[in-house]
Amino acid sequence: MLTIARGTSIVTENIFENRFKIFSELKRMGAKANIEGKTLVIKGVRKLHGAEVQSTDLRGGAALVLAGLMAKGTTKVKNIEYILRGYENLDEKLNSLGADIIKEGE
């Protein structure tokens, strides 16, 4: 959500050292951010655009799904095993709220 918020947001992570790894994928969608040690500085953009991105962990994968829902165009999230492991029927739940999520192979 901070990727499209107006202004600059600062997030500091003191527990999980690779928490911001997902931002390289969010940048592919148009997010603007810089990692400075344990701090992530996010500059909000007007919109994100769809892209092919890759999940690297559970929470990061969920963040990519939510970013894809906010993005203009189509977003394809690869390595969804991480997401499926931690969020039961996430696609069905989000689709019931109006999302348009399709799991390949189904």
Image: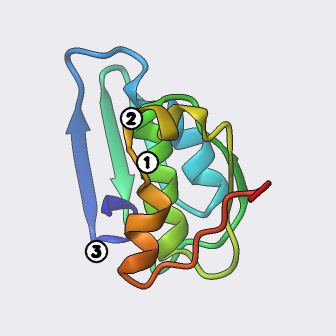
Q: Nearer the viewer, mark 3 or mark 1?
A: 1
Left-right relation of 21 to 38: right
Q: Residue 99's spot in the image, x, y percent?
A: 48, 78
Return the disc, 3 or 1, that comes first in the chain's sequence: 3
- Determine contact: label 2, label 1, CB under 8 Å: yes
In this picture, residue 13 sits left or right of residue 37: left
Kind of residue at badge 2: Gly
Q: In the rendered view, does 24 fall on the left or right side of 87?
A: right
Q: To which quarter of the image does residue 101 belong? A: bottom right
- Residue 27 is situated, as x and y percent measured from the top left of the image, at 59, 52
Q: Which residue is mark 2?
A: 86
Q: CA distance from mark 3 to mark 1?
A: 22 Å
The type of residue carrying mark 3 is Arg
In this picture, is 63 found above or below 4? above
Question: Does label 2 or label 1 sit earlier along the sequence?
Answer: 1
Which residue is labeled 3 in the image? 6
Closer to the camera, 94 or 37? 94
Circle 3 residues within 10 Å: few <14, some 14–19, many ≥20: few
Q: Tell me the SS state at disc 3.
A: loop
48 w.r.t. 88: above or below? below
* Secondary structure type for disc 1: helix
Q: Residue at x 43, y 85 (%)?
A: 98
Q: Which mark is residue 62?
A: 1
Circle nearer the viewer, 3 or 2: 2
Displayed quadrant of residue 60: top left
Q: Could you tell me how far apart the alpha carbons at marks 3 and 2 are, in whole angstroms?
A: 30 Å
Q: Is residue 33 left or right of residue 16?
A: right
At a point 39% along the width and 62% down the height, the residue shown is 3
- Mark 2 → mark 1, Cα distance in angstroms: 9 Å
Quadrant of image for the C terminus: bottom right
Of the numbered discs 3 and 2, the one sitting upstream in the chain is: 3
- Residue 76 visible in the snapshot: yes
